[in-house]
Amino acid sequence: MAGFGALQALSRRRPEHLVAAVGDGAYGPLRKAGPELALPSGFEYHRFSITGTRMSDGLPTPGMHDGMAAFPLPNGNIRLIRNHEIWLGSPNAPLAQPAYDPRAGGGTTSVELDAESLAIVNEYVSLSGTVLNCAGGPTPWGSWLSCEETAAGPGQGADRKHGYVFEVPVSAVGPVDPVPLRAMGRFVHEAVAVDPNTGIVYQTEDTPRAGFYRFLPERPHTSDRPADLAAGGRLEMLAIRDRPQARLGTGQTPGVALQVQWVEIADPDPTNATSDWSAVFKQGWREGGAQFTRVEGCWFGEGAVWFTCTSGGDAEQGQVWRYVPASDGGELTLVFESPSGRVLNHPDNVCVSPRGGIVLCEDSDRRPFVRGLTPDGKLFDFAENLESDSEFAGATFSPDGRTLFVNIQNEPGATFAIRGPWEQGAL
């Protein structure tokens, strides 16, 4: 697992010991690479898909850029599928037709890029009528799972119930038929990660009392067919073996492996979810499930599921966890806990680099950074937002590993493509 298996117990009192230096995976000090970003020497960026610019379908690019993934296309180009975290009642709601809910202004856009020049070939709305599409995740069968970060419903400004996951195929060249995947649960979704070996879908929940979930599809993907997530399956919540109702938001020691078991969620789409957004979590908690603090980013890589707790830890500045699946339930380890906002300030979206490092996007209350986490558990700065206090989101590498795509959510929302000497560090 690229060195993460032998983690030291990281000191909370000596934050300088948690910071990587050049030669340990870091790329060196940041310098102004353009008006919007500071990057290490040798890296450069290109900005595109700015909020309000016209797309190929004639519609303005929506704002509130959030989770995203990059996929290879048969013609050699790259397809980005990008979330837009827009609330109910937006003046542009819905983005396009068909729409799941005419009052909902969120959804996804898809962008085809030339793999070499990164020029936009095609750009359009690909999911419409959903709300607060925060993060999600790519699937190994060629689609993006887009998650709603709310369980709002009729009576709360919506025409339909929300709080679901929706699937957008990479092959879609326009708005898809928006089908809520109800068996995957109705709660305040954040991100998903799919284990390519089993087809199990792991899901995070962005609430102060949050669970970490897995969905076992009734019809998982095989070598010759994609998974059919709409066909149903079983939703479960992580629990710590011999520690029912474990509270993992504080008092945890990095590097200590916890043995996992899973408890079933009897009703993944409860009728009272509109009035009680924690209705699914409460089911798992009653069965002994574990409680985290705001579980956000989630990604599968290096044989494990990596996820962040934005407000977790004794300093409430963030945690990074690793879950290693196994037939006996698996193993959960706290990889990193921030002792201070100077080291790591509220990590949100996450991805695993082709070189084994972890990319962390900050959703901070001051000028945010993209940080890197090395295989020996040390952090370094990789990018800084020079324009605003808007969060970074949606970090994802191109299929060939040469380009890191990342969003700045607003002021204005935009997508960035970053290239440089990746081989000199951990990302």
Image: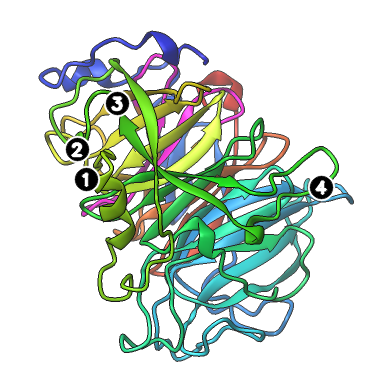
> Relative to 336, is 177 above or below?
below
Q: Nearer the viewer, mark 4 or mark 2?
A: 4
Q: Nearer the viewer, mark 4 or mark 3?
A: 4
Evaluate if marks 3 and 1 touch, with contact meaning CB atoms under 8 Å apart: no
Query: Looking at numbered disc 1 in the image, what kind of residue is underneath it?
Result: Ser
Can you identify the residue that label 2 sits on? 249
Which residue is at 67% across, 65% downward? 110
Callout 3: SS:
strand
Query: Looking at numbered disc 3 in the image, what kind of residue is underneath it?
Result: Phe
**Residue range highlighted in magenta:** 352-379
**Which disc, if any, is residue 225?**
4
Left-right relation of 281 to 146: left
Of 65 and 312, the residue lying toward us: 312
For marks 1 and 2, the one nearer the N-term is 2
- Tell me the distance, in whole angstroms, between the alpha carbons under discs 1 and 4: 39 Å
Evaluate if marks 4 and 3 touch, with contact meaning CB atoms under 8 Å apart: no
- Tell me the distance, in whole angstroms, between the alpha carbons under discs 2 and 3: 13 Å
- Tell me the distance, in whole angstroms, between the alpha carbons under discs 3 and 1: 13 Å
Can you identify the residue that label 3 sits on? 336
> Relative to 46, is 312 above or below?
above
Q: Position of residue 11 (x, y in %)?
A: 17, 16
Residue 229, quarter of the rendered image: bottom right
Can you identify the residue that label 1 sits on? 311
For marks 4 and 2, the one nearer the N-term is 4
- Tell me the distance, in whole angstroms, between the alpha carbons under discs 1 and 2: 8 Å
For marks 1 and 4, the one nearer the N-term is 4
Q: Nearer the viewer, mark 1 or mark 4?
A: 4
